[in-house]
Amino acid sequence: MQTSFSPELQSDPAMQASEQVIRKCVHCGFCTATCPTYVLLGDELDSPRGRIYLMKDMLENQRVPSPEVVKHVDRCLSCLSCMTTCPSGVNYMHLADHARAYINDHYRRPLFDRLFRRLLAVVLPYPERFRWALRFAPLGSRLKPFFRRIAPLQPLAAMLDLAPLNVPARGSVRSNPVPQAKGRVALLQGCAEPVLRPEFREATVRLLNRCGHEVVFAPGEGCCGALVHHMGQEADALASARRNVDAWIAQREGQGLDAIIVTASGCGTMIKDYGFILRNNPAYAEKAALVSALAMDVSEYLARINLPAGTDRGLTVAYHPACSLQHGQKVTEAPKQLLARAGYVVKIPAESHLCCGSAGTYNILQPEISNRLGRRKAEAIANLDADVIATGNVGCATQIARFSGTPLVHTVELIDWATGGPRPAALNHLDTE
Ligand code: SF4
Ligand code: SF4
């Protein structure tokens, strides 16, 4: 695609990077067929190619974003399915991230939207604040019918829809000392996952310890920054990235670190991009690149180590590949192979490339599209007639559980169970031990 960024704009590293991305696009349109919003809405401006045109025009001409442009960029899930399909290697993720930050800096959203996004940014990334907010969700639930009737308040109703009826008890994730450990890894503590599904990390630590790998939690580490990054709140995202880089580099320089393990693939995609995000910061560029190189989805790490043989539990698993894992990180085979090796029959739903509609805060901010995608995903999974759904991202787990009656667990929980760990609580109704 031809561009005409002025020399002055080209001197800005962010603009320069976006121009390079745009120039790679040959407007072939292959990406449209696999874009969930185009599939649902059929509007070129809700396709990757259409959005690239909109973002190009906005950035190149330094326009104040119009409500129309913001609408179409906001509707993008950042599922990155378009990056898997694109034959020209267009890095849509970096372009959309830049456009979102530009919109955040140059567009004044309506008051409630502004306040609500700020509220999400100051609550969700902090586990204690998030846990506290969830306790009040049942009170707010009574107001849901009212919120649904008033358009600007609909995200509030969507947020309450996602809140669990009971906040899970604080998990007891304890990593045991491992004499003569075969590896030493840091496990991302994260933000939403330990509150919503503490059992994911419990299973991970248990399994890794049992296999002779030491697991540490780096003091000072917290939310990866993806939640605010996807809302264009770049200063907050950069601060989270720098804080985490400091925490993990301190571990690496202390007792050493073989990998940084991530159990939520949305966070993994973000951490693997820290090297790019902090590339222009001389104090962090090198350290961030090292952190990105050390980051691994838990399934990638498990595929590299010796796991004990699995016990066949006689179960069929519907594996849902999270977009951040399959498109963002290109980790496609490891989770399926691990499950199969552990003795499960693995089935993949139709349209597995399509997003379930979770996408960070998307299911709160864009409830209508998100719900349609969630229902479509649940139907595709139901057709498999599986005993259990496995996935590798807490966002997908929360979203799919709203629309599906099939028990849902993290892939690691099933591997842990098959190789000597306890049965996942979500499967307690089964006869099999
Ligand atoms: S598939 Fe790639 S090159 Fe083709 S229109 Fe989409 S982004 Fe552009
Ligand atoms: S990231 Fe997903 S929703 Fe956004 S343009 Fe690409 S395919 Fe469409």
Image: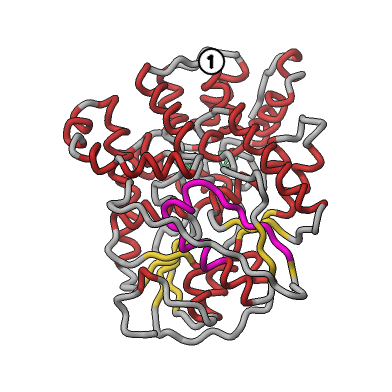
Front residue of 119 and 289: 119
Tell me the crowding category of disc 1: few under 14, some 14 to 19, or many 20 or more residues within 10 angstroms, Cα based.
some
**What SS does tag 1 mark?**
helix
For ligand 1, the image quadrant comes to top right
Q: Is residue 4 above or below residue 17?
A: above
Residue marked by disc 1: 106
On the rendered structure, is 425 left or right of 353? left
Colouring method of the image: secondary structure
Q: Quadrant of the C terminus?
A: bottom left
Residue 299 figure quarter: bottom right
Front-most of residues 131 and 14: 131
Residue drawn at x 35%, y 73% is 427
User: Taking 29 as reference, is 203 above or below it?
Assistant: below
* Residue 277 as seen in the image, left or right of residue 321: right
Q: Quadrant of the N terminus?
A: top right
Residue 307 position, x and y percent, is: 63, 79
Give the magenta range. Answer: 184-204
Residue 64, percent from left and from top: 52, 13
- Tell me the residue at 59%/30% (across/down): 236
Q: Is residue 233 above or below residue 270?
A: above
Left or right: 36 as drawn, with respect to 21: left
State left or right for residue 416 relative to residue 170. right
What amino acid is found at the position of numbered circle 1 in the picture? His
Q: Is residue 173 magenta?
A: no
Percent coordinates x, y for residue 208 in the rendering:
62, 70
The residue under the point 47% across, 64% down is 410
Residue 93: x percent and y percent? Answer: 59, 39
Task: Say which residue appears at 68% left-offset and 56% top-offset.
Answer: 260
Q: Is residue 201 magenta?
A: yes
Total marks shown come to 1
Task: Identify which residue, 297 or 97, lies in the foreground.
Answer: 297
Quarter where residue 288 is shown: top right
